[in-house]
Image (cartoon, grey):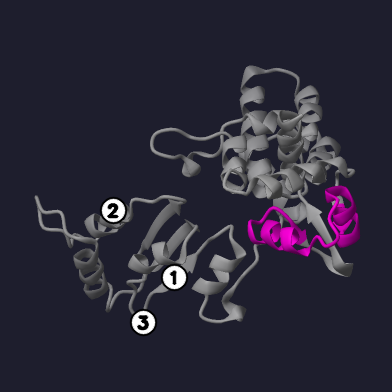
Amino acid sequence: DGVLWTSLGETPTLLRKLMVWGEALHVIPPGKTPTLEELTSQLTAALRNRHMLLIVDDVWQVDHAAPFQVGGQGCVMVMGSRLTNVARALAPTSADVYRLPVLTDEYALSLLSHLAPGTIESHPEEALQLIHDLEGLPLAIQVAGRLLHEEMKMGWGMVELLHELRSGANLLNAQAPNDMQQGYTAPTVMALLKRSTDTLKAETLQHFALLSMFAAKPATFDLAAMAAVWGVPDARATVRQLVNRGLLEPISGGRFQMHALLMLHAQQIMAEMA
């Protein structure tokens, strides 16, 4: 019967977000603004016998997701969060938590080819190296693909831009995809990354920035190395916070990884602190 989608963010206007669903399902009487509780009840009744996919993205607090849990037995709900503890709290069981991996070379090249047709065919080796340098991150590839497409329309040299994009630096100031806009403004990639770091405590933010001292691509480190850089006897408390924010990712052998764009973000924070 269709798809209902919304993206919340840190401080969502829940009623306004939910009213979009109410208007789509025609449950709001003309000229009336219901309360959040009234609208939740109306949507629950409207969806009782429908088969729909409900998507609630960028959930920061468990309570924010509650009004959107209005689907009946024939509906499926998918929620997205950058916060591990929120994801675990929202999922019925631990098996219902899906940690989104990076793209494989095959899918990353397919996405890049879709966004910038002709790039892979004209520069297959450079395109593959770009994918590897961006570590398969969908956001980075999507922004890079749009920049490549714009460059192709201008008829300018592609090899130079491919080399520039491999450093990742100009991706930080590029505009994020339109579906990530806030209000009427599409944020930069840097602005999206800052949403995950701006609310960190000062000490935790400093520890995150200090990780930029490690060699990048891939930037991996163990607890002992992080404790040494941070000057603390035990790094686990800070590591838990960074993993929960999606700023660090556990990998095999007791090691942790920071992806390319986050490494650049950490470097910029470090420069601002200097």
Q: Quadrant of the N terminus?
A: bottom left
Q: Is residue 114 left or right of residue 126?
A: left
Q: Is 29 on the left or on the right of 181, as rendered?
A: left
The residue located at (46%, 39%) in the rendering is 181
Q: Is residue 50 magenta?
A: no
> Label 2 sits on what residue type?
Val
Dot 3: what SS? loop
Residue denoted by label 2: 20
> What's the CA distance linking mark 3 and mark 2?
22 Å
Residue in front for this viewpoint, 45 or 51: 45
C-alpha distance separating marks 1 and 2 = 17 Å
Give the camera-side residue of 243 and 8: 243
Q: Is residue 140 visible?
A: yes
Residue 274, quarter of the rendered image: top right
Q: CA distance from mark 1 to mark 3?
A: 10 Å
Question: With respect to residue 97, does 169 lie above or below?
Answer: above
Q: Secondary structure at mark 1?
A: strand
Residue drawn at (48%, 57%), measured in percent from left and top? 57
| Residue tagged 3 | 73
